[in-house]
Image (spheres, grey):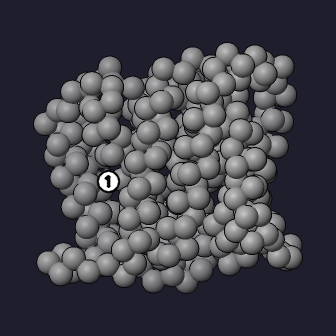
Amino acid sequence: MNERHALGYGLAAVLLWSTVATAFKITLEYFTPIQMMVAASIVSAIALTAIALYQGKLHLLGRTFTARPFYYLTLGLINPFAYYLILFKSYELLPASQAQPLNYSWAITLTLMAAVFLGQKIRKQDWAACVLGYFGVVVIATKGNITALQFDSPLGVGLALFSTILWAMYWILNAKNKADPVLGVLLGFLVSLPFSIGLSVYLGGWKPVPWQGWVAVSYVGLFEMGITFVLWINALRLTNNTARISNLIFISPFISLLLLATIIGEEIHPSTLVGLVLIVCGLLIQQLKSKKAPAANTSS
């Protein structure tokens, strides 16, 4: 029964994550990246507060923060503050069909950073994964014109790749965090909100947004930043086969491209599919590592 529930949670998370690239592009029609981050963060904080309250853990929030205040401040400034601001800006500058696969290479970035900061050994499989993954990144970024190395938006590509560094850094800092995961993520949103709200006001304030924009940004807050994380954590906790659940995430980018093409009519360049297949092959090769290796968490 637990395995069935784990599979259900995992599939639900993957399907919801598959929709967020489309949701990002729709939401960016109504908000600037910083405004989008503020609004989505508020929605996420409300959702996670409700989940913590339902789980009977909300009373532990203050104690969790005061035990390590600087730690949670650092986490919050990395994610959601810096990570989502940079990620949303990359989506503003690039077609979502490029930004999403580029961001998807974060797991490969994590392998390299874990070797540097955690002293983890990089195996032959990891090097092969890195070569395949970053070759796929180049294919996507150059639209297949590899020798010319010309990018439609060098800044957009740079930001998408930088977001992978921030996301990997966040999970490295989280590696030894023993606190409840829902409370940890909720604290990140709460401590980052004053900074994101202040920055949004400094950069020009807010203009009236139609209801469609608020629906879109609420969807992002719930299903990219909030509820989906809890579904994924539950899937990993309930399963006896972590690798099988983790491998579900490889379905996500292909569903995402399909949704981008059908819902917002974005053209999917053939090189994007080629590059994405290379990245996914690299990630699958990483699964050949020791079964004792922890399963990577994921998003976006």
Q: Is residue 238 above or below residue 28?
A: above
Percent from the top left, x then y, of residue 92?
55, 73
Give 50 or 285, whichever is nearer the viewer.
50
Percent from the top left, x then y, of residue 26?
66, 74
Q: Residue at x 27, y 32 (%)?
A: 115
Q: Residue at x 75, y 47 (%)?
A: 194
- Amino acid type indicated by mark 1: Val
Q: Is residue 121 above or below residue 13?
A: above
123 relative position to 280: left or right: left
Q: Residue at x 52, y 48 (%)?
A: 299
**Element under label 1?**
helix
Residue, disc 1: 280
Give 4 or 229, whichever is nearer the viewer.
229
Q: Quadrant of the N terminus?
A: top right
235 relative position to 186: left or right: left
Q: Is residue 197 in view from this perspective?
A: yes
Percent from the top left, x then y, of residue 275?
29, 66
Give 155 or 282, whichever is nearer the viewer.
155
Q: Residue at x 41, y 71 (%)?
A: 155
Percent from the top left, x then y, of residue 105?
36, 53
The answer to which image quadrant residue 103 occupies is bottom left
